[in-house]
Image (cartoon, rainbow, N blue to C red):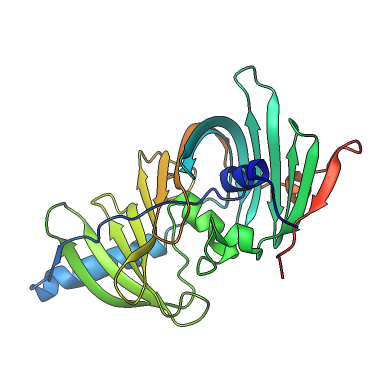
Amino acid sequence: MRLSAQGISWCCAGLMILSGCAATPPKTVEISSSTELQQVESKLSRFLGQSCVNAVDCDVQLSWQAYGQGKTFSATMQAMYPSSLRLAMIDPLGRPLVLLGAHGNRFTLADNNGAIGYTGTMDLDVVHKFLPDFIPKDDIFYWLSGRVNRGGMQTLSTKKDAEDKLYWYEVAYANGNSKDMTHKLALNGANQLVRHMVLDADGDIQFEATYSEYSATPRTCSWPGRVEISGDALEADFTLIFTEIFDFKPMEQKRFQVKIPPHFEVRKIINES
């Protein structure tokens, strides 16, 4: 069935903690010194090998602009590797507006204003409008946490930023829906990921995340305080600000299972034929 305009808006704000519009590819220069090149290549290896948290319990501020409209919500969020997510958006008085639960390939969304519940799968066309199919659903936590899935990753080139003190790594994945695309990763002096781009064969940025305001975690790697998402493949711009982090401990899977109240109308979302 077709989602209403309100339903699409909630899915875009909730289902996709990921969305946007175009950015500019970086200006880079070659690394001429073999010694420096080796040091920069080992920098990526250290980044990928860090011990990192696999869950977060936090308050966030979620902002998005799509279809000529923009909104900002306060929300509580729990997320856990690889793709479990619970997001509760609240009004200024602290009352819940929307509750989203996603685990594996399924999601449930409860719209308290409309007393409507939505159920569906992550491979729906409406989801791909805000989470392109070349972004694996099992990589959601990587994108939220400023990390990179190293499984099947091949490094194609290593360069320096022509303007900023950043190091750029062009990588590709041999398998999956992004096998015909390249990724560009930028690490700063603290060995933190500050930009992650996905480019098509023409060099256009289809998806990009920019990370900033990192803070320490109980593990080796740090956690970004601000994530901005954009790209040609998306239908919205998105900013996620972590306003308070309560814990990084793993949670039970039932935490991500949303129960729709019995008096709600339930709508199962399917692709239109």
Q: 184 or 33: nearer the eye?
A: 184
Taking depth in this image into account, of 102 and 20 the one nearest to the observer is 20
Taking depth in this image into account, of 216 and 265 the one nearest to the observer is 265
Q: Quick check: 124 left or right of 72?
A: right
Q: Can residue 79 be seen by looking at this rendering? A: yes
Q: How many marks?
A: 0
Relative image position of residue 139 (x, y in whole percent): 54, 62
Q: Quadrant of the N terminus?
A: bottom right
Q: Residue furthest bottom?
A: 174
* Residue sitting at the far left: 32
Which quarter of the picture shows residue 75? top right
Of the 4 image quadrants, the one containing the C terminus is: bottom right
Could you tell me residue 99's position as x and y percent?
Answer: 70, 38
- Residue at position x 17%, y 71% from top? 37
On screen, residue 237 above or below 27 = above
Image coordinates for residue 170, horizontal then vertical, percent: 30, 71
Q: From this viewpoint, is residue 82 visible?
A: no
In the rendered view, would you say 222 is above or below 199?
A: above
List the single residue furthest toward the top: 93
Taking 268 as reference, is 72 above or below it? above
Q: Quadrant of residue 270?
A: bottom right
